[in-house]
Image: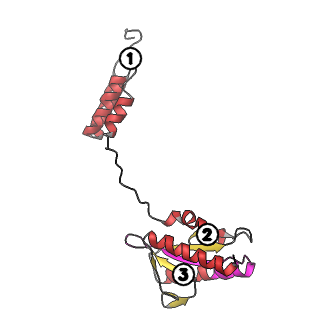
Amino acid sequence: MSVETRRQSMLDEIERVLMQGGFIRLSQPLTVYGVPFDVPSAFVGGTGFLDLVVVLDVTEGTPKKMRQAYWLFERIAHALDEADSPRPLTGVILHDADAARVPTEDFLRLGRVLLVSGPTSASIELAPILPIILEPSGEIATDPLEELASRHADGQDGPAKRALIEAARSGSDRVQSKVLQWVEAPITVGGITP
């Protein structure tokens, strides 16, 4: 696969994953506070998300390309600051893991950084910025306090622990009262109070 074909497949997969996660693709060039920026692609978070995600390309792995990507990221971060934007900046950096190490510590001073090394790993590498979608469960929900009480019902102090767990249904004051009763109760050794 040629470098350009690989690059384009990475961009396509990033777009698919982010848009499936509710992000909205921005038109090119990206404009922040009236300043245009030439980035491969940019996205903003959908409803409930403020993120500005810019894609930066360092697939060649040359120091020159890395410097250019850093300077671009830095200029975008400063433009957001000048605009008093509440948007957090995330840089998605396309790179070839075999070409060179990406100096992320420089980028991290400006925003969040995610490295995408290939189209097949994009969904995993972009996971930190994607919303968590919980599928409805077919299980019937159980009462967590009842489950906890049943697990701790055994043993010599089982009834006291169960009473403490049951007190949780009435609130923290009731729990505190039960704990104090439990702690202040006379200590018995072999049925004899010392």
Can you identify the residue that label 2 sits on?
A: 116
Label 1: few (<14), some (14–19) or many (≥20) C-alpha neighbours in 10 Å = few
Give the mark nearer the N terminus: 1 vs 3: 3
Q: CA distance from mark 2 to mark 1?
A: 62 Å
Q: Secondary structure at mark 2?
A: strand
Q: Residue at x 52, y 63 (%)?
A: 127
Q: Residue at x 39, y 30 (%)?
A: 151
Give the mark nearer the N terminus: 2 vs 1: 2
Q: Amino acid at mark 3?
A: Ser
Quadrant where the N terminus sits is: bottom right
Q: CA distance from mark 1 to mark 3?
A: 70 Å
Q: Secondary structure at mark 3?
A: strand
114 on left or right of 20:
right
19 on left or right of 148:
right
Indicate which label's residue lies in the foreground, 1 or 3.
3
Q: Is residue 112 above or below residue 180?
A: below
Instruction: Name the residue nearer the viewer: 72 or 143.
Output: 143
Is 86 a magenta residue? Answer: no
Q: Amino acid at mark 2?
A: Val
Label 3: few (<14), some (14–19) or many (≥20) C-alpha neighbours in 10 Å = many
Can you identify the residue that label 1 sits on?
A: 187
Q: Amino acid at mark 1?
A: Ile
Q: Position of residue 64 (x, y in %)?
A: 73, 82
Q: Which residues are magenta?
A: 46-71
Q: CA distance from mark 3 to mark 2?
A: 14 Å
Q: Residue at x 63, y 78 (%)?
A: 7
Can you identify the residue that label 3 sits on?
A: 41
Badge 1 vs badge 3, beta-carbon distance below 8 Å = no
Instruction: Name the residue nearer the viewer: 65 or 84.
Output: 65
Q: Position of residue 58 (x, y in %)?
A: 67, 77
Image quadrant where residue 55 sits: bottom right
